[in-house]
Image: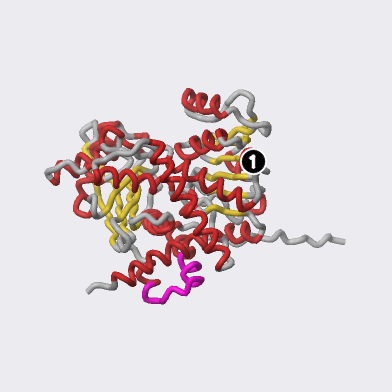
Amino acid sequence: MATARIPIPIKPEEDLNSFRIAMRQFDTAAEKCGLEPGLREVLRRPRRSLSLSLPVKMDDGTIRVFDGYRVQHSSARGPCKGGIRYHPNVTFDEVKALASWMTWKCAIVNIPFGGAKGGIVCDPRQLSKNELEHLTRRYAYEISPIIGPDKDIPAPDVYTDAQTMAWIMDTYSMTHGSSAPGVVTGKPLFLGGSFGRNEATARGCLFVIRSACEVTGIKLNRATVAIQGFGNAGSIAAELLAQNGATIIAVSDSRGGILNRAGLNVTALLEHKAKTGSVVGLPNSDPISSEDVLELQCDILVPAALENQITLENVDRIQARIVAEAANGPTTPDADIVLYKRGVLVIPDILANAGGVTVSYFEWVQDLQELFWDEDDVNRRLERVMVKAFADVHSASKKYDVDMRTGAYVVGIERVANATRTRGIWP
């Protein structure tokens, strides 16, 4: 007699498009806070979207044309603000999503900016420094009519840095006839940058993790931590969490991961990464995949790599009690629902990684004043902002009986909506 086969349940396929995810998250929160339909339609759409063709003369004399974007989502609460990323997988939808997330992020930490984002489709690792400079200056020239210290202030993002910002500042300044350090943030210190900017994203993440530990009853100095992604945010977060007594049990980068359940030596790890270019192969550690880092039993998980890392495919295997999203968009909306029902506290990206834009705001203020603060002052101000923002989001999540992400959106949307209503629709 033949044995009946038991069908294996197939999980529904998720929509991983960044912009549609952002709109789904927005709509969920807008419904919760009763946002009126007309204003909802205004806040769903970017205010301005620019698509560019960027011809660049390469070192060998040939000409290549790169695609570039700049999206300004909202200026209801102040000038637009957002990074510029160089990556082969940049898409217009991704840039639109990131611009909208920046709007809510700035509102959540209550700084007077709206959201923007930029990107160029390229692989900067395949370009010489000379080619990168030409590409950056061409892009800066093309977007210069819509950026400025009182219009839109770019910043570094994926594969861009302080040198990139210096080129943009110089190009803008040369075309406008006067030096304008406030046109970008994330600049070198000697060109008007701010102390604490390099560590700001990770330090802000540390502050909200501390607050999350308080509301969940976890002792940070006894907590175990796994970090996916060991770039700027992930590596500095590892260092800061270890200084606060946490035990870093696993980390990963694009080449793979490492595990030591007794705790990794973070100082040795940073030295190994600087020497070899990867965390892989650190003595006294076991190899592990980047995907497996997410699924380890730990108190705190810090996704600090790419978007869409926690999905319906692996969410049932996530064992952390707190997920602190140092990266943008690492958790899908469907996975969010599962984690919330299981009692996992997710500190959403628009709160967890808002330290970067907060210190960018501090840099902008210092540039306009031409008066600069020391690092301790920057860090104290950052802590006050992040602790208050966590409290506001946690309070909203309790008031509306929703997860922390929806609570964060509610806080951001209500602040932007109030500014838009008060200013009115012109003409």
Tag 1 residue = 223
Q: Secondary structure at mark 1?
A: loop
Residue 82 lies left or right of residue 261; in this view the side is left
Give residue 229's position: percent from left, percent from top.
51, 39
Magenta residues span 26-39
Give residue 357's position: percent from left, percent from top.
38, 48
Give residue 99's position: percent from left, percent from top.
37, 56
- The C terminus sits in image quarter: bottom left
- The N terminus sits in image quarter: bottom right
- Residue 392 position (above or below residue 270): below
Residue 253 lies left or right of residue 196; in this view the side is right
- Please name whichever residue, 197 or 83, is drawn nearer the observer in this view of the structure: 197
Identify the residue at the far bottom of this view.
37
Q: Quick check: is 36 in the magenta stretch?
A: yes
Residue 276 lies left or right of residue 301; in this view the side is left
Q: Is residue 341 visible?
A: yes
